[in-house]
Image (tube, helix red, strand yellow):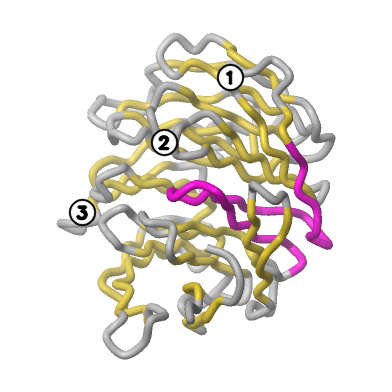
Amino acid sequence: MSGAYQTSRKEQAHEDSAWAVLWTNDDKIVSGSIDETVKVWAPKTETSPVPKLEEVSTFTGHFLGVVSMSASSDGRLCACSSLDGRLRIWNLDDKSLVKLIDPGPVEAWTVAMHPQGQLVAAGSQTGNVNIFGVGAQGDKPEAVLTPHNKFIMSVAYSPDGRLVASGAMDGAVHVMDSVSGNLIRKLEGHSKAVRGLSFSPDSKVLLTGCEDMTVIMHDVSQPSGTVATLTGHDSWVLSVAHSPAGGECITGSSDKRVRVWDLGQRQCVYTSKDHTDQVWSVDYNSSGSKFVSASDDGSVMCGVQVTG
């Protein structure tokens, strides 16, 4: 996708800031908010090519607000972290709580679910990546990876499930083997907090979004790492998502903008100014033909490329 887009914003999707959003592979949109709710939306396109959001269900129980979310590849399970330090894993199909994990007040800030849904990685304020089993008993992690000694702001699994990446407050990015926990790459280029991570569909490229207002493309198979740096945002990059179709990515920023980037040309091809406050989270649908964003303005926005 590149060029012009048509957007539709669901105003007051939440009663407070929306900090997290995702678009599952089975076509559900899920958003999380400081209003302590997780909402599931059906993107309807009967009357317009741009999806109109219809609320399907609301999950409650998160205290102090939802920070981050991640879904299994089949779209059935969704892991959520909240400011109360707990993880909740929801079954989006039967609308039930699968597991509540209480690892301690500083051990689960940001969350990533393994594509197969059996594991959840949580980045901690102490610099650990805690790996929890969805089917395990109790609150103890099955493994603890220790790549950082700084607050981990972002975590991500690769689509093939073989890698887990973490981004820290000091700009450090580590890529680890998800089975052994061994460090594979330490990626350079940032000096401020890395807020967003996203792998390419082939798991070879990692995008890192940072408070330094840039996104860096890293080839995780090469020691040199850095492929290119994308610039254009006027404030922190808070979220980044690689298109499942390849070739582009989308970013959300504190500058209130959503940008779409052509990764081959290394340039921004579209900017949305629809949000009225900072954009915390962005994602694509499974085909990469549409995007969704969530903002401090409490809205959730969908976008689709205009053709013809």
In the displayed structure image, the side of residue 48 where residue 95 appears, left or right: left
Q: Which of 282 and 148 lies nearest the eye of the viewer?
A: 282
Q: Is residue 25 above or below residue 102?
A: below
Sequence order check: which comes first, mark 3 or mark 1? 3
Marks 3 and 2, how far apart at CA: 18 Å
Where residue 171 sits in the image (x, y, percent)?
77, 33
Marks 3 and 1, how far apart at CA: 39 Å
Sequence order check: which comes first, mark 3 or mark 2? 3
Where residue 139 sits in the image (x, y, percent)?
36, 28
**Circle 2 is placed at which residue position?**
102
In the displayed structure image, the side of residue 157 where residue 107 appears, left or right: right
Q: Are marks 3 and 1 in contact (CB under 8 Å)?
A: no
Q: Is residue 242 magenta?
A: yes
Q: Residue furthest front?
A: 308
**Residue in view at x 49 percent, y 82 percent:** 8
**Circle 3 is placed at which residue position?**
96
Where residue 199 sits in the image (x, y, percent)?
52, 37
Query: Circle 1 — which element?
Result: loop
Q: Which of 86 and 117 lies nearest the eye of the viewer?
A: 117
In the displayed structure image, the side of residue 302 where residue 128 appears, left or right: right
The answer to whether residue 45 shows anywhere in this view is yes
Query: Circle 3 — which element?
Result: strand
Q: Which residue range is magenta in the image? A: 228-255
Q: Residue furthest left?
A: 94
Residue type at mark 1: give it.
Ser
Q: Is residue 53 above or below residue 83?
A: below
Query: Circle 2 — which element?
Result: loop
